[in-house]
């Protein structure tokens, strides 16, 4: 009987060990994608569904080109797999492992059930450089701090193998029923994201060309450039990595090759790879602390006096806080499904510390609007900013949105790109337009609002709330 390859966050042909294992059997292969929104895995947000739609289309094309087909089904994965197995008379099911707690639980249950039905079931490693349980400290405990984690994880990575894409896949005599992608309606009609999202090319080819572009240019200077939101100095690989259109081993191997070839200084390449390391670290943290999406890593934060602030929250989501760097970030997010990392830190800090809104509300908004929304990375980073996470930034580090703007966007390039109302303001006032002389800012004042909170006062209130939390008021 045929072999079913259950594709999930590994929407690629190259360096896909499950697909390769299936192809290597010489038997017919059935590539299957299941849209499973009911098995406890957090359902994708709107921007992710937009991406998924495109990614599945390109994957279907690539499979067609090697004599195969992508079978699409919607429903609980257990039921769908059993159904496809029965109809296809399949003998085996293979997949690449996921590491989110809910996915692990679901997959374990499915593995047991299929084995009980007499099938061969195999799972492979595609999504991480190091699986979470393989990196432990001297006392066989998971690391809670990034630097020692990465030192240990990095040491494992002496020889990273990348598998080529299969050239052909044997087709089954009869293809099982497939849904049509159009019928799934993943592509939202409102909002119309088509313009802003056109910066993206979802799919394996788009991922590989992003990597190429990055390694043949911006990686040289990444260490400093990565903090400047007005530049395109980072790889923008995050959505591709999340959906597995490219694997971390491919990124690793290409980056190391670039270093060996002298395309960029080793230090710059290692800095980039250590960011890929943060992705690994966050996945390991979530694996070891499965409650992290709901609970503070540091329980003392459970008593934090978050405020109900629906109007502040709404202003934040719409990019109307009156702080240009915060608003530019939130508008970039809405328009493109992406936000520069430094600005993610500043906007998240603003919501948590200036507006005193629970980090979980911000995490949920990002989840719905980011094309790279990733449970481990989103939750890990929100808790990092809140100060409640593993190896977190201390709570009392409160980003000053004005100072951050002056430092990392000194000419106002980034804020002017996203807030056209500010286009004519000189650089020295663009991050605090309310200080601009009347004659320069008349236009801007009319259309761009005043700050919704006063920075020094908000900062003092946040520190006071934290002091009370620690009981040393
Ligand atoms: P590059 O600088 O080119 O880095 C290369 C890769 O390393 C990225 O593609 C990404 O996979 C990984 N990486 C980089 N920085 C981080 C980081 N801080 N944590 C984990 N992995 C990292 N990243 C997500 O992938 N999904 C999320 O849902 C997400 N939510 C975030 C929420 C907040 C509040 C913050 C502060 C950060 C969040 N990040 C998230 C991390 C980071 O902002 C993005 O990974 C990064 O901006 C992606 O851009 P890039 O691909 O150009 O990164």
Image: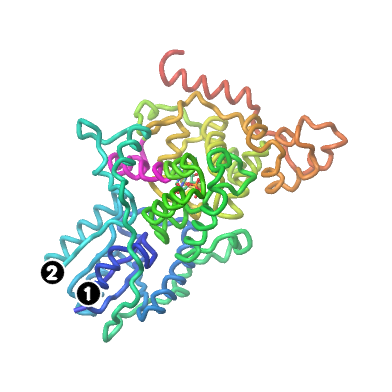
Q: Residues within 10 Å of mark 2 (few under 14, many from 20)?
A: few
Q: Quadrant of residue 450?
A: top right
Identify the element where label 1 is drawn.
helix
Q: Residue at x 36, y 41 (%)?
A: 281
Q: Nearer the viewer, residue 299 or 270?
A: 270
Q: Residue at x 25, y 33 (%)?
A: 137
Q: Residue 297 vs residue 432: left or right?
A: left
Instruction: Using the image, tell me which numbered label, if any, was put on residue 85.
Output: 1
Q: Residue at x 51, y 32 (%)?
A: 307
Asked whether disc 1 touches disc 2, contact meaning CB atoms under 8 Å apart, the reply is: yes
From this viewpoint, is residue 370 visible? yes
Report the predominant secondary structure element of the magenta stretch.
helix
Q: Quadrant of residue 384?
A: top left
Rendered location of residue 78, percent (x, y):
25, 65
The magenta segment is 276-295
Q: Is residue 287 magenta?
A: yes
Rendered location of residue 331, percent (x, y):
63, 48
Q: Is residue 215 above or below residue 382?
A: below
Instruction: Using the image, tell me which numbered label, if any, was put on residue 117.
Output: 2
């Amino acid at each position: 009987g045929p072999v079913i390859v259950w594709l999930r966050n590994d929407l690629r042909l190259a360096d896909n060990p499950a697909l390769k294992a299936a192809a290597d059997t010489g038997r017919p292969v059935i590539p299957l994608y299941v849209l499973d929104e009911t098995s406890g895995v957090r359902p994708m947000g709107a921007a992710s569904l937009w991406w998924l739609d495109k990614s599945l289309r390109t994957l279907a094309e690539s499979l067609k080109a090697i004599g195969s087909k992508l079978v699409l089904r919607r429903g609980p994965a257990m039921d769908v797999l059993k159904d496809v197995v029965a109809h296809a008379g399949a003998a085996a099911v293979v997949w690449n492992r996921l590491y989110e707690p809910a996915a692990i639980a679901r997959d374990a249950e499915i593995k047991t059930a299929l084995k009980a039905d007499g099938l061969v079931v195999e799972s492979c490693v595609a999504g991480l450089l190091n699986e979470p349980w393989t990196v432990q400290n001297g006392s066989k405990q998971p690391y809670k701090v990034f630097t020692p984690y990465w030192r240990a994880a990095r040491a494992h990575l002496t020889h990273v193998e990348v598998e080529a894409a299969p050239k052909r896949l044997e087709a089954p005599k009869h293809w099982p029923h497939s849904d049509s992608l159009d019928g799934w309606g993943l592509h939202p009609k409102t909002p119309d994201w088509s313009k802003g999202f056109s910066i993206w090319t979802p799919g394996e080819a788009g991922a590989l060309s992003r990597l190429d572009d990055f390694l043949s240019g911006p990686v040289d200077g990444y260490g400093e450039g990565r903090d400047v939101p007005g530049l395109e100095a980072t790889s923008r690989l995050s959505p591709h990595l999340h959906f597995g259109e490219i694997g971390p081993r491919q990124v690793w191997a290409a980056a190391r090759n670039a270093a060996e070839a002298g395309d960029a200084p080793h230090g710059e390449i290692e800095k980039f790879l250590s960011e890929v390391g943060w992705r690994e670290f966050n996945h390991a943290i979530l694996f070891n602390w499965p409650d992290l999406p709901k609970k503070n890593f540091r329980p003392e934060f459970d008593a934090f006096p978050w405020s109900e602030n629906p109007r502040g929250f709404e202003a934040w989501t719409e990019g109307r806080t009156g702080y240009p760097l915060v608003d530019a970030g939130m508008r970039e997010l809405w328009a493109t499904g992406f936000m520069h990392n430094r600005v993610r830190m500043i906007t998240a800090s603003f919501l948590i510390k200036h507006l005193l809104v629970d980090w979980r509300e911000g995490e949920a908004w990002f989840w719905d609007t980011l094309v790279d929304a990733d449970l481990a990375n989103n939750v890990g980073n929100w808790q990092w900013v809140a100060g409640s996470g593993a190896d977190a930034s201390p709570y009392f580090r409160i980003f000053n949105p004005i100072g951050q703007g002056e430092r990392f966007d000194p000419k106002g390039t980034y804020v002017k790109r996203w807030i056209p109302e500010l286009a004519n303001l000189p650089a020295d006032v663009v991050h605090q337009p309310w200080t601009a002389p009347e004659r320069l800012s008349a236009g801007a004042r009319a259309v761009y609002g005043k700050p919704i909170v006063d920075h020094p006062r908000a900062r003092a209130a946040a520190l006071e709330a934290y002091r009370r939390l620690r009981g040393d008021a």
